[in-house]
Image (spheres, rainbow, N blue to C red):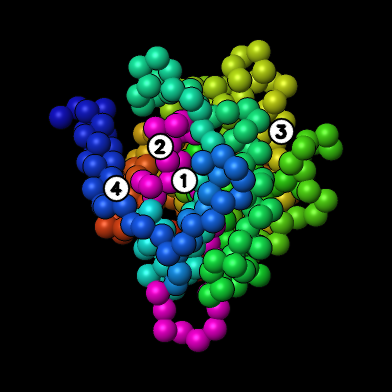
Amino acid sequence: MPDDAAAAARAAAEEESAFSHAPVDPDGTAAYGDHPDQVIDFYAPRTTEPGPSPLVVVLHGGAWRAPYDRRHITPFAAFLARRGFAVANVEYRRGGAAPDGEGEAAVAGRWPETFDDVAAALDALPALVGEVLPQADARRTVITGHSAGGHLALWAAARHVLPADAPWRTDRPAPLRGVVALAPIADFAVAGKLNVCGGAALQLLGGVEEFDVRRPYADPALLLPTGIATTLVQGRADVDVPQAVAESYTEAAAKAGEVVGLTLLEDVGHFPLIDPAADACAVVVEEIAQLAW
């Protein structure tokens, strides 16, 4: 089998495995807005340890496109809960459907609604955690996200370094233990050159006409340094969001005077990072634990 064919076959098998798990219902759900997508699912920690548990905020991927919602990452959220974490699985508004309404035919993201929602969810989270998930220790919060969700995790941790006129800017860093971004779309310029997810980053920002204007408000590679502990976990065999995207972000961080961790996993593609059946998922949990505990 040619190398490209073998890579495609492995990627397909990894995706099939990740999506083979039945969705896991949450222990509670709370709204942070009026739109049906403005909700957060909560998973209580499955632990016998006394005292509150660290909180992991999960932002799902799917190229910011409507067909992919938070349900596909619920097995990963439940896996984190079984490892003793309290979990908040955030939904947000994604791009609307194109005429055929399937897969990459759907538009990636909504401007500014996708960013409005992530900012609003994080701002509402402390109060919602107190109401719905008292087992969680919000003082020990780590944000993680996969693919497009990895981008949103990095962005959420960088709101204090957004341009001064950004509506989502905060006046101080978020009270986070850290960020663990999983195969994130972390550099929009490199992602564009590689046509990651069918040009999703370009679509997210509204197309060619708006890309350069909006990029300073949205591209994590331009929002550095954050001063928040950050680790990227990336499969070397990822054909969806290639390793070069993560490497470009870490290089940008270094130029900005910040050290960002980059854990590269051999023979691992895009989806094992959120697949409870994969060894890579255990590595992800360990990276989260190193920041949270």
- The answer to which quarter of the image holds residue 44 is bottom left
| SS under mark 4 | helix
Is 51 one of the magenta-colored residues? yes
Residue 250 seen in the current view: no
Q: Which mark is residue 18?
A: 4
Q: CA distance from mark 1 to mark 3?
A: 20 Å
Q: Nearer the viewer, residue 51 or 235?
A: 51
**Residue range of the region highlighted in magenta in the rendering:** 46-73
Where residue 213 appears, x then y in whole percent?
A: 72, 22
User: Mark 4 or mark 1: which comes first in sequence?
Assistant: 4
Left or right for 63, reference 12: right
Q: Which mark is residue 217?
A: 3
Cβ–Cβ under 8 Å for marks 4 and 1: no
Q: Rate crowding at label 3 as few (under 14), some (14 to 19) or many (20 or more) other CA atoms within 10 Å.
A: many
Residue sitting at x 25%, y 36% = 12
Residue sitting at x 66%, y 45% = 119
Where residue 284 appears, x then y in whole percent?
A: 43, 59
